Amino acid sequence: NNINNKTAVIATTGKTGRELFSLNDCDNYFYQVGSMGCASAIALGIALNSKKKIIVLDGDGALLMKMGNLSTIGANQPRNLIHILLDNNVHDSTGQQLTNASTVDFSNIAINCGYKESYSIDNVTDFSKVIKKKLRNLFGPIFIHIKIQKGSIKNLGRPTIHPKDVAIRFKNFLKS
């Protein structure tokens, strides 16, 4: 509830976008479909072309797939970007196959790739404090790695809005 309707949110493929849609669908949410690992690159492109605050919700499997995005974000220094890694150490959407995220120091990698600040968090209270503070005074790119439990909402549905329509409304949000 720290994120308002003026902040763009890009959700990675799979259950992340599905849960976000199920919890609170909004015009400022973009559910990235079918391109695992690309949410952070999409968020970078938006951040470099918008004055709005941008949050990308990434997954450990997706980030491991496209770790070069970290160095590209660091090199481009988007001041308005917060990169949140939801790390459950599994590919939750495809059957909870293990990733090797437990062997990776994502926060340190982000700093070494040029992110201004990086946090490694394992509880909702600390996460809420950091995100609230960073949204109030954003000088990014900021990386927040949060360890989460595997699994998702029971009977999780899928977005009922066609991806093309999500893109159109998100584009209109960015123009506003």
Image: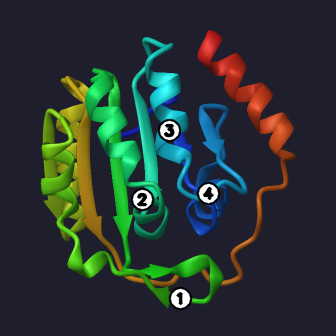
The dot on residue 120 is: none
Q: Are marks 2 and 3 in contact (CB under 8 Å)?
A: no
Where 136 sits versus 117, above or below? above
Question: Is disc 2 surrounded by few (<14), some (14 to 19) or many (20+) residues within 10 Å?
Answer: many
- Position of the C terminus, as image quadrant, is top right
- Percent across and percent down for residue 99 are 41, 81
The dot on residue 63 is: 2
- Percent across and percent down for residue 15 are 60, 68
Task: Using the numbered discs, state the Cα–Cα distance from disc 2 to disc 1 in whole angstroms.
Answer: 16 Å
The dot on residue 96 is: 1
Residue drawn at (14%, 52%) of the image: 119
Disc 3 element: helix
What's the amino acid at mark 3?
Answer: Ala
Q: Are marks 4 and 2 in contact (CB under 8 Å)?
A: no
Point out the frontmost of discs 1 and 4.
1
Task: Using the numbered discs, state the Cα–Cα distance from disc 2 to disc 3 in whole angstroms.
Answer: 10 Å
Dot 3 or dot 4, earlier in sequence: 4
Disc 1 element: loop
- Percent across and percent down for residue 55 are 42, 38
Q: Could one spot residue 123 in this view of the protein?
A: yes
Task: Using the numbered discs, state the Cα–Cα distance from disc 3 to disc 1 in whole angstroms.
Answer: 24 Å
- Left or right of 134 on screen, residue 101: right
What's the amino acid at mark 2?
Answer: Leu
Tag count in the figure?
A: 4
Report the residue marked by disc 4.
17
Report the residue marked by disc 3.
41
